[in-house]
Amino acid sequence: MTDSTSTRSRHRHAALLASACLLAASAAQAQNTPTQPAATPAPVVDKSIPKIPAGPWQGPRLPDGQPDVSGFWGPAFGSYLNLTDPEGISSGERQRNLPPREQRAPSRVSDPADGQVPYQPWARAKVQEYQTYYANPIKPEYVDPLARCAPPGIPQALYMHGHEIYQYPGYVVFLFDQGTRIIHLDNKPHLADNIKLWNGDSRGRWEGNTLVVSISNYNGKSKFGRSGEFVSENVKIEERYTFDPNGKRYNYEARITDPTVLTRPFTVTVPIRKYTEADKPRPVVYAVREAKHAGKDVIIEYAEERACIEFNSGHAHLPSGAAK
Amino acid sequence: MTDAPIPARPPRGIRLLAAGLMLLAGQLAFAHDAIPRLPNGKPDFSGIWQTLTPADDDLEPHAARKDAAPGAGVVEGKFIPYLPQALAQKKKNFEARETADPRSKGWTLGVPRGIYYPEPFQIFQRPRDLKLVFQFGHTVRTIHTNQTEHPDVIGDLLSGDSRGRWDGDTLVVDARNFTDQTWLDRAGNFHSNDLHVVERWTYLDANTVEYKATLEDPQVYSRPWTLGVILHRHREKDFQLIEDYRFTLDFDQYYPPKRDKN
């Protein structure tokens, strides 16, 4: 029983490790050949944040009038390992050579301009403490909630792995590996304040090409990345998902307000790209397979199970038995 | 025969029968038209559903217990046809149910238990698939309805791999590739990873669905058997799922970091 789950858990984390190694390898390559014109250029990953102006939606619509943005999406670069330096060293990782900061992907914090979370001193100290003990979690609070199978939460889910957007009249549903967010478009009142949730309680509306979502009831328990940034249960989050009418990109912006831990609000921006049948499946980011069927057209379907499949397997990033 | 007079009107009995048939036909037509449908004409099971039966306490007939409401049972033929060894295992499960039930740890309920577990689940449906989001554990099960088949190579899944087809207005789902880590109820009824489930989903009216599941598992049951429950649509004003990540309750007090008091 445990074997099958831990195998699958290992599979998922091995894939993650592989992509991290890939990232490290390409970073190392960039370091070794900083000035020479590359003879065989490495695959170019666009790390810019494209300009997608908010405006009317020109693309296809669903029968209920919503812009049709259904499909598989994922972060255009980087992962959840480090919020403010997505290609930098993350908690618990060994030091390694990195290209200069300006050659690495920008901080996911787009405001303030310095790319840092505007923490109150006590909260910044807590983040540093978490980073220090990440690899050796001598207290339960240093264990990443992800390693306990909790959902990645907001906004981490948007840049952790890939996700699928599923639409139904009155709803936009974000399907992550763990954690599902049901965005209600009918403006029903939020749940009572005392109900706190890992995925919050979301109300959304379409403004042209932008899905605007306000989140309340968020429990603040997820981290913003392996780097350990956090907010409190008093946080309010306003999200803007601005879709390019060409269907290939959207920009995710979360405006995060929390007087309990912050000195001022800040914004997380994540450029997201669409994955289609033209893309090769990629572990974690685009975990799909070709469906078996009698027809000739290619049908892509999600290949994982959207559940906590890692229970019983200990804490995935730690030697088994650590941090019970 | 040819000389027999043709009656001016049918006898009264026939007239009543005809009237009854017309009424029935009218009701059938009404029922047919009244259920929600996708633009492609197929029944649309989207909505938030829950059963009223105590099936999750125990699928089989049972009197009240300290941990269970009484129930007449939802199994056709009353009892699950266990193989002798499996019946012994079921009894062990029953004795240990308070701690051994995967539900008590907040783990994924699986199939068919998620359907009759006493918490709501929400279906989102489009022509190619149905997504079932379960409040308990907040897990998602997909039922594919795009003429695709079970993959040739696939691991064991808590909720299996589900492929649906339409038999008239009934959605017939073939689900397999299960783990052995889920139970069928709180009474320790169980299955192995050889479980194969065939579900039939049929609207009775716009707010009521008849759900039947036939379970086959040669490691555990002597023959296939069927359970049935009725699902009701939640229609309370502003009703919504509220995520139930019960398995996080043992550690959620450690997050988020709190300001030290001094």
Image (spheres, coloured by chain):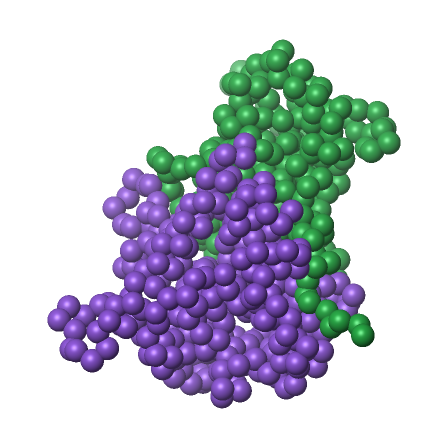
Chain colours: A purple, B green
> In the visual, does B88 lie left or right of A170?
right
The residue lying at 60 percent from left, 56 percent from top is: A137
Answer above or below: position of A29 versus B202.
below
Image location (x, y in percent) of residue B156: 47, 35
Answer above or below: position of B152 versus A243.
above
> In the visual, does B110 lie left or right of A101?
right
**Can residue B105 be seen by looking at this rendering?**
yes
Image location (x, y in percent) of residue A134: 56, 60
The residue lying at 21 percent from left, 74 percent from top is: A33
Q: Nearer the viewer, residue B256 or B183?
A: B256
**Can residue B9 be seen by looking at this rendering?**
no
> In the visual, does B31 lie left or right of B64?
left
Image location (x, y in percent) of residue A105: 38, 75
Q: Nearer the viewer, residue A188 or B88?
A: B88
Answer above or below: position of A181 versus A265.
above
Q: Nearer the viewer, residue A295 or A145?
A: A145
The residue lying at 50 percent from left, 25 percent from top is: B194
Image location (x, y in percent) of residue B37: 54, 52
Q: Quadrant of residue B99?
A: top right
Answer above or below: position of B143 versus A99.
above
Q: Quadrant of residue A32?
A: bottom left
> In the visual, does A169 lie left or right of A28?
right
The residue lying at 71 percent from left, 19 percent from top is: B91
